[in-house]
Image (spheres, rainbow, N blue to C red):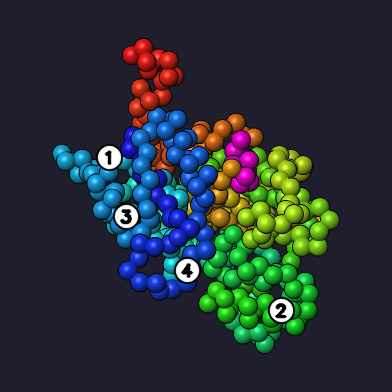
Amino acid sequence: MKVALVRNKAKKDGVINRFGQPCPEAYGEQAVQMVIDGLRCGGHTVEVVRADKTLLAELERYMPADPAIGRPTGMVFNMAYGIQGECRYTHVPAMLEMAGVPYTGSSPLGHALALDKVITKILMLHAGVPTPAFRVMRHPEENVAGLPFPLIVKPKHESTSFGLHLVRSPEDLADAVQAVVTKYEQDALVEEYIDGREVCVGLLGNDPVECLPLVELDFGGRDLRAMTYDDKYHKRPDEPRKICPASVSEPLAARLRELAVATFRACHCKDYARVDIRIDPAGNPFVLEINSMASLGPSASFVLAARHAGYAHPELVCRILDVAHQRYFGTPAPRDPVATQPLAERKEN
């Protein structure tokens, strides 16, 4: 079937005005090409489309509606993090829903809930999912009574560990809150620091949701035992090692999977996601957050977990497309039978 891979580049142009908080994220060329190659390997026709003001016109050109019944003739594989403004993960899905174009991944609702870490925590608490105690701060002098140091401070509405600080004193807390509010133009989430292990749970599918093998982040002996922006973009020499499958008891593993799925449901996510969980020294799990657009890059923990579940990268991206197509139309995405044949057979035909 026709697939439009929709993405942003690092240079965020294609807008009417520069206005609002700029999006600091973009998929690299290697990751995008791996998804393109995987979809084509699975028998799909792929074209890359920019996620900007030209998006809808390009989609209408590439995969116009069926002239007889007005139904879609293709799908979007969404890799767009957004360009600027609030709730940036929601922008492309909202445009696609308005235009009647099916797509992979969460809806605007799911992305908006997952991207707001405070709303995520409130929804988790209502669903009975344990999460670290927290406060929301805008002014450095605000009271955090009841939260013992050290504390984690981060923007309440960001991803990829942007602006994350570990603070050990009221003075450090005030500086970190001021830095978040100034740089990211939003409130700071201040939460209890859970010292212990960290495990990522990859989720794939909708009904049922498949839990991929658990991935543990091994921080070794470093002081900051938390994933940072520099870790995720490979800028630290002591980047944590990813261990898959994580060495945890089966009862604990079952509990982590249960909490991950409950978080996925509570935040109305779809198709695939990753849930990050800390485990304290007593073995008690605390869900930190859910990433509604888990990275599909070659070194991502979601991809590592999928590989251990038996999904090579082409199979993983085609599986994501299939679960989205199943959600919309009740069947996996149709393949081109010629494209999926081995090369030698295609030559004979």
Q: Residue at x 50, y 56 (%)?
A: 26
Please determine whether, in this image, residue 105 is positioned above or below residue 308: below
- Between the C-alphas of marks 1 and 4, the distance is 33 Å
The amino acid on which the numbered mark 1 sits, given as a three-letter code, is Thr
Q: Residue at x 64, y 75 (%)?
A: 135
Foreground mark, 4 or 2, reads: 4
Q: Are marks 4 and 2 in contact (CB under 8 Å)?
A: no
Q: Horizontal and vertical percent for residue 243?
A: 73, 43
Residue with the mark numbered 4: 22
Compare residues 329 and 266 and report the one nearer the observer: 329
Q: Horizontal and vertical percent for residue 242?
A: 71, 46
In the image, the segment drawn in magenta is 299-307
State yes or no: residue 304 in magenta.
yes
Residue with the mark numbered 3: 55
Q: Residue 173 shows which numbered tag?
A: 2
The amino acid on which the numbered mark 3 sits, given as a three-letter code, is Leu
- Between the C-alphas of marks 3 and 1, the distance is 16 Å
Q: Horizontal and vertical percent for residue 119?
A: 54, 67
State yes or no: residue 233 in magenta.
no
The amino acid on which the numbered mark 4 sits, given as a three-letter code, is Pro
Please determine whether, in this image, residue 334 is positioned above or below residue 47: above
Mark 4 crowdedness (10 Å alpha carbons): few <14, some 14-19, many ≥20: some
Foreground mark, 1 or 4, reads: 4
* Residue at the extreme bottom: 141
Q: Residue 73 shows which numbered tag?
A: 1
Mark positioned earlier in the residue sequence (1 or 4)? 4
Q: Are marks 3 and 1 in contact (CB under 8 Å)?
A: no
Mark positioned earlier in the residue sequence (4 or 2)? 4
